[in-house]
Image (cartoon, coloured by chain):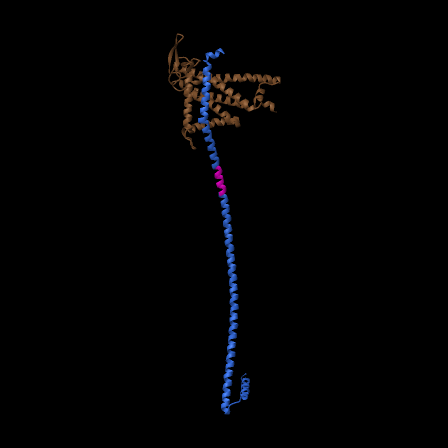
Chain colours: A blue, B brown
């Protein structure tokens, strides 16, 4: 090992250099490798997260679009059904009201006819009465005497027969 | 001007000789600590400036480690990355003006010797040998941790005579690793330092520039080689013996 002496080999210097290197290693580990690697990892994570997020947003956007389209078609379908329903209801209402009017009118007509008939009947009977009275009066005047109840009855019956 | 193989002693604290490379080591370490501190002091999600640069360095190294070590990357990374960052900082710091040129003369054995105040760190075998020892010891520590002591011993000792011989060779290889790792780094950087010093003493202006460019490449390559070898040794030694599993 003599040749090592020529190179300036000294155990204490060798040991000192080893210690130097180990101290440097510990310091670099603490102040360089650890923070830098942590930062690199963090940045990687951030990029991955951002990409994932972007992907998710895109997916959600596509989903929203599909949903939107679905909603739109649903709405238009619903609207169409409403319109149809309304149309039908209108038609039904129209038919119903027409029928109702017809029935009402018929009823009114019948009632009117009845009223007229009744009126006529009433008038007829009144007329009859009056006529009978008149005839009796005239007859009594002509005959110059007051008719008995029996005669009156007989006469009125005769008149009524006559009128009819 | 001449570059000596051994780092020169500047002063002494008690029994401890403070060499010029030792001073430079502290400067490099301090520089790295300050830079790291400022880079991570106020970290932002959108990085800029120093934070951005240090993130680039750490991420590149981490990807390199992860590509080879997979799930063990988190454990190996601090060692491997610190080897690279420390070695490349040391190598480039050594190319700064003032290294090897500012100093004082000393009378040694009757001769006047120039002693530079600063000297590039990896041109000192104590440093590179220290790095290599850490690399190999840590590698074996993780091998035992991941394989268990029995499986670890089985790598070197086997009842099968052929595997016994292979295991012996591997045991020798482990020791050669220490030498090859330390002397490769030391040799390259020392040679570069000597080359630039020599060229500079011949022609101080412009001429050394191409060599300095070369040294920039060498500095990067040596840091990478040391890092990659350590990483590969760690990965290989912590995985089970391939042939015995089938």
Provide residue A69's location: percent of width, then percent of height: 50, 48
- Looking at the image, the residue that sits furthest to the front is A149
| A138 and B28: which is toward the camera | A138
Q: Quadrant of residue B35?
A: top left
From this viewpoint, which residue is outermost toward the right?
Answer: B160
Q: How many numbered discs, if any?
A: 0
Which image quadrant: the N terminus of chain B? top left
What residue occupies the far bottom of the structure in this picture?
Answer: A144
**Main SS class of the magenta portion in the image:** helix
**Residue B236 in sight:** no
- In what quadrant of the picture does the C terminus of chain B appear? top right
Task: Check if residue A53 falls in the magenta segment.
Answer: yes
Q: Position of residue B90 (x, y in %)?
A: 43, 20
Magenta span: A51-60
**Farthest-out residue, top:** B110
Q: Quadrant of residue B202?
A: top left
* Direction from residue B162 to residue A58 in the image, left or right: left
Name above or below for residue B19 compared with residue A64. above
Which residue is rendered at x = 50% and y = 26% of the image? B75
Above or below B100: residue A58: below
The reply, left or right, for residue B240 in relation to residue B98 is: right
In this rendering, is residue A107 above or below A1?
Answer: below
Q: Is residue A125 visible?
A: yes
Residue B197 horizontal/vertical position (percent): 41, 15
Of B177 and A66, the residue lying toward us: B177
Query: What residue do we see at 58% from left, 23% from top?
Result: B242
Could you tell me residue B228's position as x and y percent? 50, 23
């Amino acid at each position: 090992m003599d040749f090592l002496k020529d190179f300036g080999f000294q155990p204490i210097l060798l040991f000192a250099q080893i210690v130097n290197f180990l101290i440097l290693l510990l310091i670099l580990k603490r102040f360089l490798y650890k923070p830098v690697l942590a930062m690199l990892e963090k940045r990687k994570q951030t990029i991955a997260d951002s990409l994932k997020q972007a992907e998710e947003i895109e997916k959600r956007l596509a989903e929203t679009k599909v949903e939107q389209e679905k909603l739109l078609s649903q709405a238009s379908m619903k609207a169409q059904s409403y319109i149809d329903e309304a149309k039908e209801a209108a038609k039904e209402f129209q038919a119903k009201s027409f029928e109702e009017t017809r029935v009402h009118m018929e009823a009114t007509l019948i009632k009117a006819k009845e009223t007229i008939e009744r009126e006529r009947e009433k008038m007829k009977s009144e007329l009859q009465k009056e006529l009978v009275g008149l005839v009796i009066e005239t007859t009594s005047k002509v005959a110059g005497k007051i008719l008995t109840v029996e005669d009156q009855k007989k006469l009125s019956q005769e008149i009524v027969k006559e009128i009819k | 001007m001449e570059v000596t193989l051994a780092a020169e002693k500047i002063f002494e604290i008690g029994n401890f000789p403070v060499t010029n490379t030792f001073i430079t080591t502290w400067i490099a370490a301090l520089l790295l600590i300050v830079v790291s501190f400022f880079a991570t002091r106020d970290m932002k999600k959108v990085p800029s400036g120093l934070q951005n640069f240090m993130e680039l360095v750490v991420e590149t190294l981490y990807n390199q480690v992860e590509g080879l070590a997979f799930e063990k990357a988190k454990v190996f990374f601090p060692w491997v990355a610190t080897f690279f960052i420390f070695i490349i900082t040391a190598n480039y710091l050594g190319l700064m003006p003032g290294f090897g040129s500012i100093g004082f003369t000393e009378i040694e054995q009757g001769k006047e010797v120039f002693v530079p105040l600063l000297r590039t760190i990896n041109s000192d075998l104590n440093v590179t040998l220290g790095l290599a020892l850490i690399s190999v010891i840590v590698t074996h520590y993780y091998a035992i941790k991941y394989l268990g002591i029995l499986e670890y011993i089985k790598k070197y000792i086997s009842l099968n005579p052929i595997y016994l011989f292979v295991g012996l060779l591997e045991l020798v290889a482990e020791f050669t690793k220490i030498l090859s790792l330390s002397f490769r780094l030391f040799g390259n950087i020392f040679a570069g330092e000597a080359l630039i010093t020599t060229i500079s003493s011949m022609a101080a202006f412009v001429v050394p520039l191409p060599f300095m460019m070369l040294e920039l490449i060498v500095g990067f390559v040596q840091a990478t080689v040391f890092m990659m070898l350590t990483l590969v040794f760690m990965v290989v030694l912590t995985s089970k013996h391939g042939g015995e599993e089938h």
